[in-house]
């Protein structure tokens, strides 16, 4: 097992990419704290349409170790309580996976400033607050890791004035934190997913999905597990000397740009 007995927090861990990361980390022996606003997994119009049990239930029923903590990463008090709970319950914290994120469609004229604030609050400020509160404990770990989930939209526009901006900032946050935490043997990296088969794609139409598939050299959307295994690698000893980097996992989409 690559992550035996390491304690991991996965924000946005109930559904989609976060759910898969939680499951894969548990398979590798990690003790997983799933942080999300709801425990029940989301169901999408196009992907992940079937009912699934809560991820902590699935992990524990299969012999793993997981717990759910209701958390809104946009609420600083919630994040602080999440870290306190993890330390009280497990006595350590080794890996923070900052996965929680939202996308609200709309261009500069359609998107309200309150919705812009909401996207930035969750996608960027939430990651900063989680990292800030986790760092003192990660410094005490022999395996300290922060893994930020960014996006291929970190490198270009096209999804409105909020989502790409928030994800671009996450990449710069990775750079800054990696410099700060390198002397403490804590690595900080980002994963930049392309289009993944999760309920977050519900804003698309069937026609948009069909056209988008034509832009991906491998001809398919990614699976949540494609991102989860990249996260396992970055959390493992195999990535001990990798920090301040972003790993694009997109089926070759950006290679065409």
Image (cartoon, helix red, strand yellow):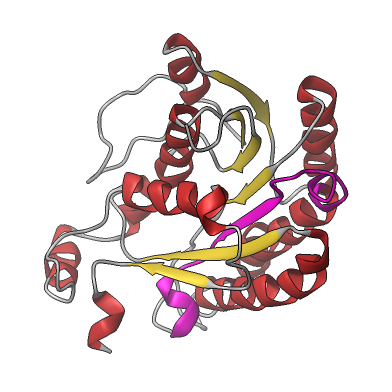
Q: In what quadrant of the picture does the C terminus appear?
A: bottom left
Please determine whether, in this image, residue 27 is positioned above or below residue 246. above
Q: Nearer the viewer, residue 126 or 108?
A: 126
Residue 108 position, x and y percent, is: 52, 83
Residue 204 position, x and y percent, is: 27, 61
Q: Residue at x 32, y 51 (%)?
A: 226
Q: Quadrant of residue 19?
A: top left
Please determine whether, in this image, residue 160 is positioned above or below residue 24. below
Q: Nearer the viewer, residue 173 or 53?
A: 173
Which segment did they paint magenta?
Answer: 134-156
Q: Nearer the viewer, residue 104 or 49?
A: 49
Q: Is residue 220 magenta?
A: no
Q: Quadrant of residue 58?
A: top left
Q: Nearer the viewer, residue 20 or 182?
A: 182
Residue 202 position, x and y percent, is: 32, 52
Residue 198 visible from this viewpoint: no
């Amino acid at each position: 097992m690559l992550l035996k007995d390491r304690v991991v927090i996965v924000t946005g861990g109930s559904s989609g990419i976060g759910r898969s990361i939680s499951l894969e980390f548990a398979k590798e022996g990690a003790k997983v704290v799933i942080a999300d606003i709801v425990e029940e997994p989301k169901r999408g119009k196009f992907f992940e349409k079937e009912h699934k049990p809560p991820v902590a239930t699935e992990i524990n029923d299969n012999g793993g170790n997981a717990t759910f903590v209701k958390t809104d990463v946009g609420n600083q008090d919630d994040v602080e309580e999440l870290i306190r709970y993890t330390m009280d319950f497990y006595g350590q914290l080794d890996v923070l996976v900052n996965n929680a994120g939202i996308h609200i469609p709309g261009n500069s004229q359609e998107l309200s400033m309150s919705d812009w604030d909401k996207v930035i609050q969750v996608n960027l400020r939430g990651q900063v607050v989680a990292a800030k509160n986790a760092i003192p404990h990660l410094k005490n770990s022999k395996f300290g890791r922060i893994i930020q989930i960014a996006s291929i939209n970190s490198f270009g526009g096209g999804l409105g004035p909020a989502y790409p901006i928030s994800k671009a900032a996450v990449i710069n946050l990775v750079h800054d934190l990696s410099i700060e935490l390198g002397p403490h043997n804590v690595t900080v990296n980002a994963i930049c997913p392309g289009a993944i088969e999760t309920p977050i794609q519900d804003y698309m139409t069937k026609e948009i999905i069909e056209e988008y598939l034509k832009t991906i050299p491998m001809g398919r959307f990614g699976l949540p597990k494609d991102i989860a295994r990249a996260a396992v690698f970055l959390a493992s000893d195999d990535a001990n000397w990798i920090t301040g980097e972003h790993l694009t996992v997109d089926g070759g989409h950006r290679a065409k740009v």
